[in-house]
Amino acid sequence: MSTLAIDKGGPSRKVKYGSMSRDRTWALRWSYFFLVLFAIFFLTPPIYMLITSLKSSAEISAATNPWWVFHPTLSNYVELLTSNQFLRFFWNSSIVSIVVVIITMLISIPAAFALARMKFWGSATLATGVFLTYLIPDSLLFIPLFKTLGVVQDLTGITLLNRWYVLLFIYPTLTVPFCTWIMIGYFASIPKELDEAALIDGASWLQTLTRIFIPVALPGLIAATIFAFTVSWAQFLYPLVFTTSVDQLVLPVGITTTLIKGDVFNWGQIMTGALLGAAPPLIIYAFLMDYYIAGLTAGATKG
Amino acid sequence: MADVALRKVVKRYDDIEAVRGIDLDIADHEFIVLVGPSGCGKSTTLRMIAGLEDISDGDIMIGGDVVNDVPPKDRDIAMVFQNYALYPHMTVAENMSFGLRLKHYPKAEIKARVTEAARLLDITDLIDRKPKQLSGGQRQRVAMGRAIVRNPKVFLFDEPLSNLDAKLRVQMRIEIKKVHQKVRTTTVYVTHDQVEAMTLADRVVVMNKGRIEQIGTPNELYHKPATRFVAGFIGSPAMNFIPCRLEDVGGALQIRLTDRIAFALPPARATRYNALPRTDKLLLGIRPEHLTESHAHLGPGVESFETVLDVTEPMGMETLVYFGLDGTPICGRVDPNAGAKDGAPMRLAMDLNNMHLLNEATGAVL
C-alpha cells in the first residue's frame, strides 16, 4: 500500500505543480484582459471630454473627427477660469464639501465608536437603523426635506432655502449613515483586547477613541473621508432643489444651468467645467492614498 | 504590591452561572495560577479581578479595599493578554509608556522606567520598533514590559503563552518566573496547561465548572489531590482510574481489581482504608509513573502482575505502555530498555504506596 502511495505521489505532484502555475498564468492573462477592457471603458469619457474641451465651438459644431483636435485652443479654460460665476461655483462646492466632510467625521466617528464598542440597550438595532436610512433614495427624501426646512425657516426666521449653507444640513443625511456604517466595520475589526488594554492602562473612552481607535482605523477613516467628499462634491439633486440663485449654486448644478441655455449647449465649456470639476476629488484621492496604509493593525495581536 | 481576596464571587450571564461562588486569598508577592479546562470560569475570574467584567455577587478586594465598583484604571493592576494586545501604531517604547504618559508622569521617569523594564526583559534593541516588526515571543515580552513599567499592585496574565510554539513557551515560562523573582509583584496567572501551572505557581487553583476544586502547592496537588477531577487533571499522562473493591482475606485488607488480580494493601494504607464499607464501588487511582516494569526485588507495597500490552509509545527517556484491565484502558511508564513491545505480554509492577482510593460516585479522594 505504501509503495502505491509513493508511485502515485511522485508524478502526480509534479503534474499538480505544473497545472497550478499554468492556472496562475491564465488567471493573470484574464485579469489583465479585463483590466484593460475596463480601463478603456472608463477612460473613454474623460478622454472625450479632454479632446472636446480643447476645441473651439466652431470646430465642435463642424462635423470633423470627434476624436481628434485639429486646432487646439485653451480658450474654454481661459474663459471659465476668468469668469466670476464659475469661480463662485467652485468656491461654493469646495466650502460645502469640506465643511460637510468635517461635520460628517465629527458625527460618524463618535457614533461608530459608541455603536461598535459600548454595548447599550438597542445598540445593534440602532446600528442597523443607521444603515437602513442610507437605503432610502434621495429622490424620495428631497420633498419632505424641503418641506421640513421650509417649516424651520418659517419658525426661526432664518433664511435657509436658496442659500448654499443649507446644503451643510442636507448632505450629512447622505454621508453620515454610510460613513458611520463603514467606521462601525473598521472599529469592530479592532481586537477587543486593545481597548481593554487601554482601559487598564488608564485611558478614558475618549482617550481610547482618539489615541487608539482613530490611529489604528486610519485607513477606514480615510475611506470614509473620500466617500463623504465625493458624495458632497458630486451631489446634483439636492443643490438643484434647494438652491436656485446663480451665486448660491455649486459646481455640478452651476455648469448645467448656466452653460445650457434653452437648447443651446456650450459643449466646449461644459466639458472644460466638468474636467476642472473632476480635478479636486482626483487630487484628494492621490494625496490620501499615500496615507492609506493597508494592514495597519498587523502586529497588534496574534494572527 | 498587595494581597488579593475573593469572597463568594459569582458571575452570571443571563441564566448561566460562569463562576459559582469563589473564595480565594492571594498573599502579597504570591504567584497564583488558575488552571482548568476551557469554560471552567478561570478567565472570567481573572477579568473580574481586572474589572473588565462586572461581579454578579460577592466581593473582590485588592490590598484590603473592596474594588467591586472601581474601574480597571483605578485598580492599579496590569494585564497581559493572550494575543498581546499591543497598540499597533506605537513603537515598543510608546507601547510600554502609554499608561505612564496618560497619568502625566515626568518624562525622565518614564524613560528611566522603560529603559529598566526593557533591560529586564532583554528588549533594549527593539525599543524603537513597531509591533509588526516583532516575533511572537518578542511581542509577549513587550506586553510584559508594558505591565512592569506601571509598577502595579497586581499582575494579571490571561493565557499569555498559548499563542507561542512549544519551544518558545518553555523559554518564556522561565522568563516569566525570572521576572517574578525580580519584581515580586503579586501575580494571578490563568492557563489551561497544567505543566505551566505546576512549574510557575507558588500555589495552583484548580477550577472546574465555575468552582474551585482544590487550592494547593504544585506538590500537594500532585501527591494529595482532593477530587477525581484534580487527580485526573494534574499530571501527564493522566492518572489511571481502575474500578475496584476492598476485601478482607485472612484478616488482611486487600484490593481487588479484576477476578484475577487482587493485591494486599501496604499496612499504612490498610489502616487508612479499613473503616470503609466493603460494598462501596471504589476507584483505584494510580499514576503511570507508579506502574513500571517488574523486576526480581520488589520493595514493600509494590505488587506485580502479568498483562498483555496493546500499544507502546517510546518517548526516549521512557516508554509509555497501554493495556486494558477488564476493559479499563491503563497507561504505564516503563524503562525504554525493559523490552516493551506492541501486543506482547509483560510483567508490570504497581507501587501501592503511591495509590489513591476514590469513591466512584462522589469522586472524592478517600
Image (cartoon, rainbow, N blue to C red):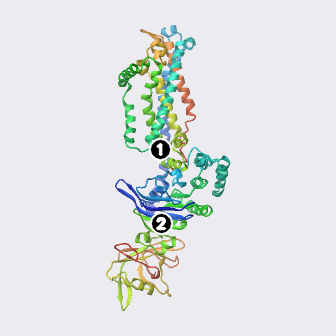
Q: Which amino acid does the dot numbered 1 rest on?
A: Ser
Along the line of sight, the residue nearer the viewer: A252 or B259: A252
Along the line of sight, the residue nearer the viewer: B228 or B101: B101
Mark 2–mark 1 contact, CB under 8 Å? no
Residue extending furthest toward the left: B279
Q: Are marks 2 and 1 on the same chain?
A: no
Residue A138 drawn at (x, y percent): 38, 25
Q: Is A210 displayed left or right of B282 in the figure?
A: right
Q: Residues within 10 Å of mark 2 (few under 14, many from 20)?
A: many
Q: Quadrant of the C terminus of chain B?
A: bottom left
Mark 2 secondary-structure assignment = strand
Residue extending furthest toward the front: B65
Q: Indicate whether A254 appears above or below B300.
A: above
Q: Which residue is mark 2?
A: B205
Residue B86 drawn at (x, y percent): 55, 49
Mark 1 secondary-structure assignment = loop
Q: Which residue is mark 1?
A: A189
Query: Which chain contains the residue that carries disc 1?
Result: A
Q: Residues within 10 Å of mark 1 (few under 14, many from 20)?
A: few
Quarter occupied by residue A72? top right
Q: Indicate whether A127 appears above or below B269.
A: above
Q: Which amino acid does the dot numbered 2 rest on?
A: Val
Numbered badge on residue B259: none
- Of badges 2 and 1, nearer the viewer stands 2
The residue under the point 49% across, 14% down is: A247
Along the line of sight, the residue nearer the viewer: B313 or B188: B188
Residue A197 drawn at (x, y percent): 53, 50
Q: Quadrant of the N terminus of chain B?
A: bottom right
